Structure formats: structure tokens, C-alpha cells
């Protein structure tokens, strides 16, 4: 194990590995945020009184959670490009080749899976909120918008926070899978460095330590957020 390979600048690969960690964090944050939006929409559909909406949400979560994330990535990467080119050709007569930016593609791939898991977390959190709180809010004269933002959303956020913390962790770790589409994050950069230096153990160990550091910091952040949320409830 040659630690000199981790020097910064032209002397080593330290700066490239650090950039890979930054890309990993950015794509995880973007995918997680988009996944929460998708999950909230799916949760609303699951709780809807309209059967087709419930059926669509159930089908989405069942399919996405039932197949490997790597397969989701391949389907979106190859199928998405084909669909875009078909739309461009049919609607605009454009016959050239184009694809979405690789960062955006990776974000969408991860968000599709994050959205399916987030939907179940959010749906469960909504169902845990005592109905009496919403009835009390109505009794004191709150309208629908006020009940949603002042009563429902804070309660759902508190109940959903532990589950959404787990969704964040697997989204962060699943960024390693998008190396297969060419995005240079931690795993892709480690593979490039290992192939160039013939020191795979060194760089894959560094990759493991980077992931461990990111997940550990994330755990502390979500633990702190849960304590803050529960403290706010006790004060109320």
C-alpha cells in the first residue's frame, strides 16, 4: 500500500479522489431531494380517493422496489436516451444524436428508486398523525392550507425523519452504481486510479473510507435533526 499515491497535484491522486467525493455528495443530494418530491407525490396518490391514482402509485413502488437499482439505472440510461431521440424526431424532425447530461441522468436514476422508498415512508407518517389534531385545527378556524402547512407537514416530517434518513443512506451508497454510466464519482475515480497505478487495494480502501466518512457524518446530522424535532414537540 503506497500512501504517496494519495498526494495532491501532479504527485498523486488525492485531489481527484476528493473531487470524486464532491461529485458523489452532490449527486446524492440532488437525487435525494428529487426523490422526496417524487415520494410525496406518490404518497398523496396512495392516500387518494381516486382509484387510478392509487393503482399507479402502487404499481410504481412495487416495480421499482422489486428490481435491482442497477437495472433501474440501465433502463433509464438506455431507454431514456432512446425515448428522447424518438420524441425529438417525431415532434421536431431532429435526427441527430443527443442524450441528457450525465450528472442529470445519474440524478434521475437514483431519484426514481429514492422516490419509491420515500413514498412508503411518507405515507406511513401521514397515517400516524392523529386525526384529532386536524379536527382540532378545523375547530379553531384553520382553512385547508393552514391545516396542511401548520399541522400536517410538521407532524409528518417528525414521524418520517428516521425513515427518510435511511433513504438518504442508501441513496448516498447507491451513487457507486452510477459509475457504470460514466459519471466520475468516488468508485469511478477509484477504478481509474487503480487501473493507472496498479494499486487497487489502496484506492478501493480510500473509497471505502470516504463512503464511511460521508455516511457517519450523515448519521450524526439526522440524529441531531431527530433530537431537535422531538425537543420541539415536547416544548409544544
Image (cartoon, rainbow, N blue to C red):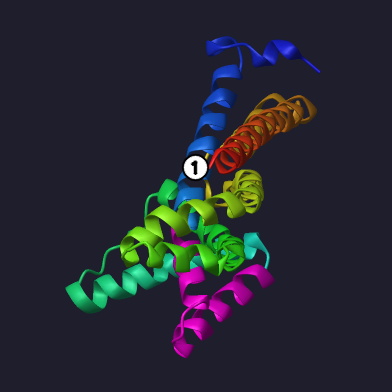
Residue 80: x and y in percent read: 43, 67
Residue 231, quarter of picture: top right
* Residue located 33% across and 67% down the image: 144
Depth check: 7 or 61 in front? Answer: 61
Left or right, residue 127 beside residue 48? right
State which region is magenta: 37-66
Depth check: 219 or 104 in front? Answer: 219
Residue 173: x and y in percent read: 66, 44
Depth check: 45 or 199 in front? Answer: 45
Q: Is residue 153 above or below residue 223?
A: below
Q: Give the labeled residue for mark 1.
A: 29
Residue 58 falls inside the magenta stretch: yes
* Residue located 44% across and 67% down the image: 41
Residue 126: x and y in percent read: 55, 65
Q: Is residue 9 above or below residue 52?
A: above
Dominant secondary structure, magenta = helix
Amino acid at each position: 500500500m503506497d500512501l504517496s499515491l494519495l498526494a495532491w497535484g501532479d504527485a498523486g491522486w488525492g485531489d481527484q479522489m476528493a473531487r470524486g467525493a464532491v461529485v458523489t455528495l452532490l449527486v446524492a443530494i440532488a437525487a435525494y431531494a428529487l426523490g422526496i418530491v417524487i415520494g410525496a407525490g406518490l404518497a398523496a396518490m396512495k392516500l387518494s380517493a381516486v382509484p387510478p391514482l392509487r393503482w399507479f402509485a402502487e404499481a410504481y413502488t412495487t416495480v421499482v422496489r422489486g428490481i435491482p437499482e442497477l437495472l433501474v439505472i440501465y433502463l433509464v440510461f438506455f431507454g431514456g436516451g432512446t425515448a428522447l431521440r424518438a420524441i425529438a424526431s417525431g415532434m421536431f424532425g431532429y435526427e441527430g444524436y443527443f442524450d441528457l447530461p450525465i450528472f442529470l441522468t445519474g440524478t434521475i436514476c437514483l431519484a426514481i428508486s429514492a422516490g419509491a422508498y420515500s413514498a412508503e415512508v411518507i405515507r406511513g407518517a401521514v397515517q400516524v398523525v392523529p386525526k384529532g389534531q386536524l379536527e382540532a385545527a378545523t375547530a379553531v378556524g384553520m382553512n385547508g392550507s393552514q391545516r396542511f402547512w401548520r399541522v400536517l407537514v410538521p407532524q409528518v416530517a417528525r414521524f418520517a425523519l428516521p425513515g427518510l434518513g435511511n433513504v438518504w443512506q442508501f441513496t448516498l451508497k447507491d451513487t457507486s452504481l452510477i459509475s457504470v454510466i460514466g459519471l466520475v464519482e468516488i468508485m469511478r475515480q477509484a477504478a481509474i486510479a487503480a487501473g493507472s497505478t496498479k494499486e487497487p487495494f489502496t484506492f478501493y480502501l480510500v473509497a471505502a473510507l470516504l463512503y464511511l466518512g460521508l455516511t457517519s457524518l450523515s448519521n450524526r446530522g439526522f440524529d441531531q435533526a431527530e433530537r431537535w424535532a422531538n425537543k420541539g414537540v415536547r416544548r409544544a
